[in-house]
Image (tube, rainbow, N blue to C red):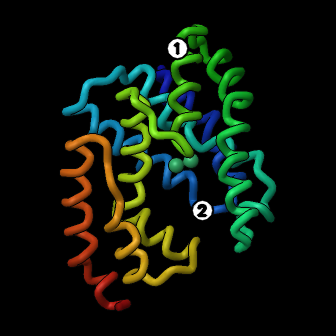
Amino acid sequence: MKDQNQLLWERVRPLLKKAKRKDFILHTKKLVRAMNELLESEKGDPKILIPAAYLHDVGWSMVDDKLQTSTNKDDRSLALHQHIDFAPDITRPLLSDLGFDKKSIQKIIKIIISHKFVKPKEHDSQMLIDADTLSDTYLDSFESDCKSYHSSPVEFLQFRSRNSFYTKTAQDIFKKHIRVLEVNPKIILRR
Ligand SMILES: [Fe+2]
Ligand SMILES: [Fe+2]
């Protein structure tokens, strides 16, 4: 029998496929992996945090394609805001269909809408932001993002190296990721 996370992924995957800004399927898979790694050392409820991880970027599925891929700064900012604004209306019915109770849905939505533009004090919300940032420094995400953002690996590695984190656990995992990226032949060869 499929567990709730598998059922959730079946619903989320087609939504993420619609989003054009980058490979959100890969990004979300890596974010879930990062969240599981954080949960090995950090306190948090996986029944809330894993669904929040799967769903955090579903709002992109409703953002206009042209806005997502625009090089204009204002367009990009509007798109970023919209992916947060659209998230609750997609998330609420989806979780309700899967049998999540109202309180859990509220908690999950609160975490999702706090992953951009705010500096949350709640540990749960901070963990999602850390997992979101970490997800982009796994080797395959890094390479995929270089293509999506038309950025050179060297420039992009410098940009990613400036990432900061709320939790020490994320900071430690991040250091390992950066070491992998710095010595990776695929990246070095393209310098
Ligand atoms: Fe996001
Ligand atoms: Fe994200």
Q: Residue 162: horizontal and vertical position, in percent?
A: 34, 65
Residue located 33% across and 54% down the image: 164
Residue 121 lies, with reference to residue 68, above or below; the image says above
Q: Is residue 74 left or right of residue 186?
A: right
Kindly indicate the quadrant of the structure image that contains residue 131.
top left
Residue located 26% across and 46% down the image: 170
**Tag 2: Cα neighbours inside 10 Å, few (<14), some, or many (≥20)?**
some
Residue 9 in view in this figure: no
Q: Residue 152: horizontal and vertical position, in percent?
A: 46, 84
Pointer 2 with pointer 1, Cβ within 8 A: no
The residue type indicated by label 1 comes to Ser
- Disc 2 versus disc 1: distance between alpha carbons? 29 Å
Residue 163 lies, with reference to residue 1, above or below; the image says below
Residue 66 in view in this figure: yes
Q: Which mark is residue 104?
A: 1
Residue 22 lies, with reference to residue 81, above or below; the image says below
* Residue topped by disc 2: 22
The residue type indicated by label 2 comes to Lys
